[in-house]
Amino acid sequence: MIENKKHKREKLSLWQIISSVFAAAIGVQSNKNRERDFNQAKPTTYIIAGAVFTLLFIISLVILVKIILNNAI
């Protein structure tokens, strides 16, 4: 007989989501955390967090370049 195993999706903390997105962005995500993320969280959570991270990263790069260019002149 085949058993149906349902994964109970536990809510991850905001810090766990942020650290997972950051670790994945720089390519150092551990296998344990990756499995936790896939088993416990909804994909939309990471899609939104990744989009926010990318937007903040681009904005910070633009600001940094503007600061450097203004100081170079």
Image: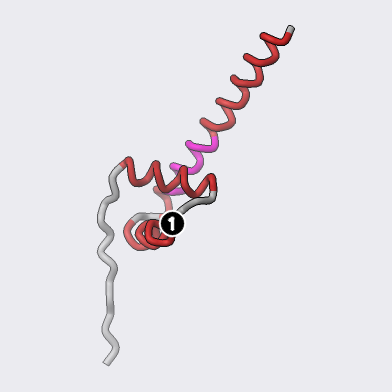
* Displayed quadrant of residue 34: bottom left
Type of amino acid at the residue the image marks with label 1: Ser
**In the image, is residue 18 part of the stretch drawn in magenta?**
no
Q: Position of residue 17 (x, y in %)?
A: 37, 45
**In the image, is residue 47 part of the stretch drawn in magenta?**
yes
Q: Is residue 27 above or below residue 66?
A: below
Question: In what quadrant of the picture does the N terminus appear?
Answer: bottom left
* Residue located 43% across and 56% down the image: 30
Local crowd size for mark 1, using a 10 Å CA cut-off: few (<14), some (14–19), many (≥20): few
SS label for mark 1: loop
* Residue located 35% across and 63% down the image: 39
Report which residue position mark 1 lands on: 30
Q: Is residue 59 above or below residue 34?
A: above
Q: Position of residue 58 (x, y in %)?
A: 59, 31
Q: Position of residue 35 (x, y in %)?
A: 39, 62
Instruction: Please provide the residue range marked out in magenta.
Output: 46-54
Q: Would residue 59 appear left or right of 14 to someone viewing this image?
A: right
* Displayed quadrant of residue 9: bottom left
Question: In what quadrant of the picture does the C terminus appear?
Answer: top right
* Residue located 42% across and 50% down the image: 44
Q: Position of residue 48 (x, y in %)?
A: 45, 43
